[in-house]
Amino acid sequence: MPLIINDEYPEKLFREDGKRLDGRDLNELRPIKMEVGVIKNADGSAYMEWGNNKIFAAVYGPRDVHPHHLAKPDRGILRVFYRMATFSVFDRKRPAPGRREKEISMIVADCLEPILFLELYPDTSFEVFIDVMDADGGTRCASTTVAALALADAGIPMKSLVSALAVGKIDGKKVVDLSGIEDKAGEADLPIAITWYNEEISLLQFDGDMDLDDLTEFLDLAKESLAKIHQIQLDSLKSKYVTLKREEGEN
Amino acid sequence: MENETDENVGEDIQEDDETEDEEFEDFEDDEDTRDIVVPGEVLTEDTKNFLPGRGTIYNNDRTKIISLNIGLKQIKKNYVNVIPLRGFYTPRPGDKVIALVIDKNPVKYKCDINAKDFGTLKPKNTIKRGKIRSFRGSGGSGGGSRQEEANAEKYEIGDILIVKILSADRLNKPELTTVGKYLGKKNNGFVISIDPPKIPRVIGRNGSMIKMLKNLTKTNIFVTQNGRIWLKGEDIAHERLLVESIQKIATEAHTVGLTDRMQEFIINEKKVRGIE
């Protein structure tokens, strides 16, 4: 007899004092922690804790393409494997990749492709494995962010990093970085990714109910927070080497 | 014969270092500040006086020079370079690398050279010239090739070879040869591997680091561009010290004044371990 839990959402997504349910302001991010070089056998790797999300990313490549018919003779390919662990959500997630996983794998790959020089590596594949250990809303954005970090750690030439974030509308107010419950119970959400090379939007999805006129406002709101995420990415990437340098200085 | 070649290795390497230095001259040690940069970071907005060098590009409207890699920023003349700290080995013609034979058939040997593709070593590229030349009129081309076959070196799966890359490009598998100075099979010693971008630090400026390592640990070393290092010492204690030193170099590759610090470290360790 399976345990059936009704999805019950609170009526209000704001507290009495005007803050969100987890105590954040409207444009406040959840706490983010990133680390690179966590998986020894991978060419590059990264780990991220974003609120309650816990995500690993590992990069392998350049290497041969299997199955071989996927190889392109004029350029390399980027393959992303986004998977959620069975224990990452409340109901056990079936381990077989479903439609959602395939979609997210595809959008993350499409999002990262413009920053890589795939034409320099014909007949080659770069593979990014993203494993979500714990999920609480916004995993596609977090996955994109951490995958970019892992690619940079692998030493693959890239034009810039990519940062992603979801903005949305809950109870009629515009907020950034929706948590799991806000994502489900809110009115609209809008995941956005940006390539910092030319500051172009690399991912834009939309779900829910929102006025089209609000879009530019949402984009402005997102860009502010994306800059913060980008800074955390840069710091975590450098910290691997800077801490070593500091130790040397002390000695 | 084998012993002779092995004894020569010590000298061989010194010549080798000098050739390798030319390529990695830009990995200099004497700069005080080494900025760590990450992909997308703006290196300079002064595009009139600077040009993008290795590991860098212009942005779309050519107003900035940005980095492509995680590495160390370096300005040389009017070029802005980024020396990568992470990355993979891309074979280039002329490189001498350590290869592992992983498959063989009558037509070719398949070698792992720590690159994306396996290298192919054809028997015709293993024939040492000047050994036994087929005499004139020995029976046409057929006889000649049979003679050559007899002269070709025979390798087994699992052999460690030092090979030179004859041809390498983006599309085809690299072709290798074992004919040449210092090339051929290694019968003793062992091979360790580190990140390929860190190899220039193991060699040091004008081969200073490798000379220091060799003198202090009395070990023969052969450093190759694909991140593999062959070494053979007097005894296991010296070899172990050398391996630990190389690993220390690899983890501290981005720091300044590494050669002096390593010298101190080795002398200190030798006292601690009681080896001379």
Image: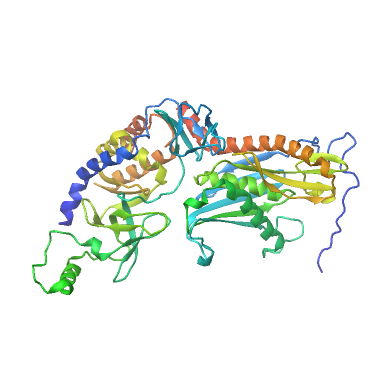
Does A247 appear above or below B182?
above
Residue A173 screen position, x and y as percent: 85, 39
Coloring applied to the structure:
rainbow
Task: Kindly tell me whether residue A37 is visible in this rendering.
Answer: no
Q: Quadrant of the N terminus of chain A?
A: bottom right
Q: Residue B269 versus residue A143: which sits nearer the camera?
A: A143
Identified at 58% across, 36% down, the residue is A234
Q: Is residue A6 left or right of residue B123?
A: right
Residue B81 screen position, x and y as percent: 44, 34
Q: How many marks?
A: 0
Does B105 appear above or below B214?
below
Residue B77 screen position, x and y as percent: 39, 28
Res A87 quadrant in image: bottom right
Q: Is residue A100 left or right of residue B186?
A: right
Q: Residue A94 versus residue A190: which sits nearer the camera?
A: A190
Q: Quadrant of the C terminus of chain A?
A: top left
Q: Residue B47 versus residue A192: which sits nearer the camera?
A: B47
Residue B237 screen position, x and y as percent: 30, 45
Identified at 50% across, 38% down, the residue is B57
Residue at the extreme left: B136
Task: Kindly tell me whether residue B71 is visible in this rendering.
Answer: yes
Q: Residue A227 versus residue B153: which sits nearer the camera?
A: A227
Identified at 55% across, 37% down, the residue is B59
